[in-house]
Image (cartoon, helix red, strand yellow):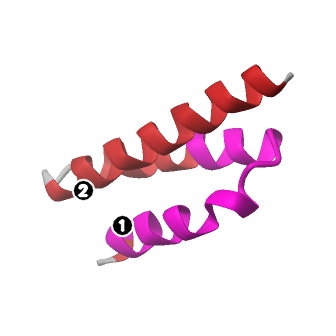
C-alpha cells in the first residue's frame, strides 16, 4: 500500500514538472490535458492536498 502511494506520488510530481516544461515550450493544450489527468489521479489517491502548491503553480502557468 505504501509503495503504491509512493509510486503514485512520484509519477504525479514528475508529471507536473513535465507539464511545466510543456507550457514553457508553448504546448499549453498538451499541458492542460496532462494536468487534468494528474489532478484526477491525485484526487483518487487522496494526494491532492499534499501537492496543492505544485498544482496551483501549474494552474498559474496555464492561465498566463
Residue under label 2, please give it.
Answer: 23
In the displayed structure image, the side of residue 38 where residue 46 appears, left or right: right
The answer to if 51 sits in the magenta stretch is: yes
In the displayed structure image, the side of residue 55 where residue 3 appears, left or right: right
Label drawn at residue 62: 1
Label drawn at residue 16: none
Element on which disc 1 rests: helix
Residue 6 location in percent, x, y? 68, 31
What residue is at 74 percent from the left and 62 percent from the top? 49
Q: How far apart are marks 2 and 1 (CA)?
A: 7 Å
Tell me if residue 10 comes above or below residue 64 in the rendering: above
Q: Which residue lies furthest to the front in this view?
A: 2
Q: In which quarter of the image is the C terminus?
A: bottom left
Q: In which quarter of the image is the N terminus?
A: top right
Q: Which residue lies furthest to the right in this view?
A: 1
What residue is at 70 percent from the left and 59 percent from the top? 50
Q: How crowded is mark 1: few (under 14 residues within 10 Å), some or many (20 or more)?
A: some
Residue 42 location in percent, x, y? 70, 45
The answer to if 44 sits in the magenta stretch is: yes
Residue 55 location in percent, x, y? 53, 62
**Secondary structure that dominates the magenta span:** helix
Query: What are the residue bounds of the magenta stretch?
Result: 37-62
Q: Residues within 10 Å of mark 2 (few under 14, many from 20)?
A: some
Residues marked 2 and 1 touching at CB (< 8 Å): yes
Amino acid at each position: 500500500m505504501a509503495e503504491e502511494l509512493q509510486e503514485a506520488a512520484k509519477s504525479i510530481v514528475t508529471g507536473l514538472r513535465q507539464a511545466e516544461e510543456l507550457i514553457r515550450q508553448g504546448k499549453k493544450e498538451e499541458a492542460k490535458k496532462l494536468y487534468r489527468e494528474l489532478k484526477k489521479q491525485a484526487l483518487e489517491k487522496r494526494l491532492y492536498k499534499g501537492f496543492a502548491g505544485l498544482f496551483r503553480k501549474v494552474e498559474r502557468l496555464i492561465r498566463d
